[in-house]
Amino acid sequence: MSDEYDNNKSYQAQSSEVMDGSTGSVNPDIDYVRPAEVGEQDLYHGHSFIEKWVFCQDAKVIGVQYFLTAVFTGIVGLILSWLMRLQLGFPELAGFMTAEHYYQFVTMHGMIMVVYFLTALFLGGFGNYLIPLMVGARDMVFPYVNMLSFWMFFVAVAVLMASFFVPGGPTGAGWTLYPPQTILEGTPGSGMGILLMLISLSLFVIGFTMGGLNYMITILQARTRGMTLMRMPLTVWGIFTATVLAMLAFPALLVSAIMMTLDKVLQTSFFMPTILKAGEVLEYGGGSPILFQHLFWFFGHPEVYIVALPAFGIVSDLISVHARKNIFGYRMMVWAIVGIGGLSFFVWAHHMYVSGMNPWFGFFFATTTLIIAVPTAMKVYNWILTLWRGNIRINTVMLWCLGFIVTFVNGGITGIFLGNVSVDVPLSDTYFVIAHFHMVMGIAPLMVIMGAVYHWFPLVAGKMLHEGLGKWHFWITFLGAYSIYFPMHYLGFIGVPRRYFEMYDSPYMTSAVGMNEFISIAAFIVGAAQFILVFNIIKTLKTGKKAEQNPWKANSLEWYTSTVPPEHGNFGERLPVVHRWPYDFSVPGAKDDFIPQTTAPSEVIHTEVEKT
Amino acid sequence: MHAGIIFLLVIIGSVLFHVFTPWYWTDIASNWGGMDDTITLTFWVGGGVFVAVCLFMIYCVFRYSHKEDRRAEYKPEDKKLEKILTWATTLGVAALLAPGLIIWNQYVNVPKNAIEVDVMAWQWGWQYRLPGADGKLGTTQVRNIADNNPFGINPDDPFGRDDIMVESDVINLENNRPVKILLRSVDVLHNWYVPQFRAKMDAVPGTVTFYWFEPNKVGEYEVLCAEYCGVGHYAMRGGVEVQDKADYEVWLSEQETFEELSARYEKLNVDGNKLAKK
């Protein structure tokens, strides 16, 4: 399938203004695209059911596998959150739940949602499905390693779930796994539970590294002809930067997991000082619990952006397509993504203002943290400026995007409270923190995921999801989630600490009992509403309306495959050649309100294209 | 259309909730009013941005919703606008950061006249120690901890002999006198937190951490552990009683020094041995 693209469609030079300036000189042929420098890869096509659907090397199938596995863990995480809310809102109904159970649910909910759900879903799911399609490649550059990546993730999930069934149950150390309590008795699951957690995390990192290498190298090396970096959809920029972050951040998690395993199994003292337990001095000494926190957050803060950056990218594309308007300030958006990614490695200790680290660090990390607010705010401005003077379709996809803007700005603003060191002092370790991070990295990315599901489902399955059900799904989820987390900030102002199994009759809590019941009821409803989507998907697959090719009239390459849904190899005989950025919507002079990336300048001669 | 109205109601509802909320700060009882003020400032600036961004978005939803016969504007970039927005945001952020850093500077610099209070945390409870007449706390070591030496004070350290041992999970403090809280833990992370004082810091085994505040309201307060420390975390409570100088001094004179405590245990031992011999 080598692609010897001879310029068999040649055009006379008519307008040189629209040329991409990167060639340096004005070329007489306005449709000229540099020839490919590398040959095409040979793909291994599966022959049996197992090769096609189980141990498959097609990135699209791997993406769906990642997606479904991540959603399974997400449902487990959702059920755990219901149990937690039952205890907090209606403890009299949760008689079966002990403090041990509660802390185990808290821990597993957090770890599952952050790592096994959101990270796997954005990078493993959307990354695998969209990267090759959007950059115009036939597949990832290392398909076999890509397959291994998913199955390593699968084993990691299996090990994690197995920890529910071992003696002592899963770890209840909180998702941050702070030593020394994590591996000491007095914390639930400090035996087998924590070991399985650490093993599972290590497997996840190994599997993720295999996938991450693929995403990075595919984006850098396998883009089709004409797809310059500055013509890539922001989705790809977001996933690319997030992957670079992950490659740099996950090793810190792996190292801390290995060290903690050694502390647990071989009684080394990486993180363990001299400890007195039940009157006995344990065989530890000299280790530093704060060292673990530095390692953990060196991973943990970029991790926030590993989730957020793909969401930023995807939502930019969705807003642009459905507002029928180019994304405003594309270059600013790209540099904001890269800048946020870079800065995210210099802010980690804002999670540790009151950890007992040297207090002078506070000045540095508060400053870096608030600097990050600037590129983030620029992204928000550019999203709403993209809506401005647009021609906005208020469909399900757009609703999720609007929901994202509201929840993300809300959560971003509360981040300025917590990042500003002395403001963090009264608020840290209270419900304000819970409300903040759920709003900004729970609900906001979830809004994007949902929007992306409604947007790309026609591509993946060839059928349109039901709009009416989609709108119900959106409104219940958005209004419900907002009424969970918005009032929760005020519990934090009162001073209610997080990770409390119950409050007894503390004066701080008695005034907030009603609110807790309300939040719990909202949580039950929002959780249940997610099954509307499950129902919608099943119904659509059975009886749904068949999707036409490119139903949203988008420009990016994934909608211009030879078949819908795309087959293995994506683009049929010839790879597409790219002539422009993916945001040429509503260009003056063009017949339609969109110009696909594959359209040559000579075909739209009379348009006033400003950017290619 | 409906979408815009619902979003608008959400924003109005948020503002109303903030104005009428019955849930807000517990009354402050320390010198850290500046933290509350910075929060209030951040609320106005941040809340303003939130409302403005959302209202602009809602306006766009009303004004520019899809019509077949209309085209969106085509304008990839606007350098001037982007520059203005960048600088305005930078200024706003700097204005919020400045007071935050100024207060942090106060937070990490303990006044000279602060009285030291040694707080020892363990799963799951609190103990307190105050310096004796010499004004200095004796050095400690985890390995020395025993029934007759709950803080592990080094027996050879002359400064430790007169340390005052508070045998209660409630500590009394003198009103309007700065306190430097020294935190130590014998097992896992803890955090000695009184919501009314606003301040907090983790206790970390293997090291001593600190923070300071000046209580300014007489009364009794509940101490909560604010750093997850295992299954008893939620039950790890203590107390503070802030008293006027006269009352405080009466309370202080009733406390036992380390020397007295050691003597008491020795006597117990001797008595116990006598009992055993009989």
Image (cartoon, helix red, strand yellow):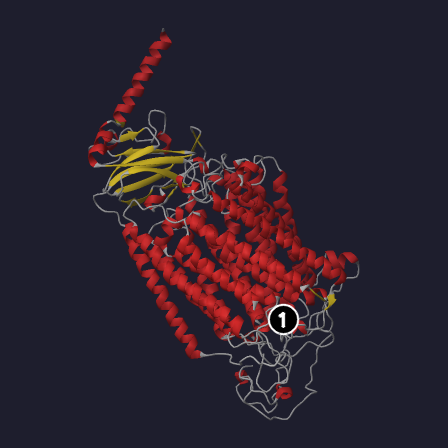
Along the line of sight, which residue is nearer the eye, A527 or A102?
A527
Along the line of sight, which residue is nearer the eye, A605 or A517?
A517
> Most extreme residue toward the right, as rendered?
A48
Q: Is residue A309 visible to us here?
A: no
The x, y position of residue B240, in whole percent, is 32, 36
Picture residue at 37% right of the left edge, 64% below the top: B93
Chain ID, mark 1: A
The x, y position of residue A124, in whole percent, is 62, 59
Q: Is residue A213 visible to us here?
A: yes
> Most extreme residue toward the top, as rendered?
B278
Judge from the rendering whether residue A396 lies leftward or rightward of residue A174; answer left or right.
right
Give the answer, above or below, for where B223 lies relative to A368: above
The x, y position of residue B125, in whole percent, is 40, 33
Q: Classify 10 Å Cα crowding around label 1: few (below 14), some (14-19), many (20 and above).
A: many
Q: Which three-letter amino acid code belongs to the residue tagged 1?
A: Met
The x, y position of residue B250, in whole percent, is 22, 29
Q: Which residue is mark 1?
A: A134
Callout 1: helix, strand or loop?
Answer: helix
Image quarter of residue B124 = top left
Image quarter of residue A596 = bottom right
Q: How many marks?
A: 1
Image quadrant where one finds the C terminus of chain A: bottom right
Give the answer, above or below, for where A80 lies relative to A335: above
Along the line of sight, which residue is nearer the eye, A337 or A584?
A584
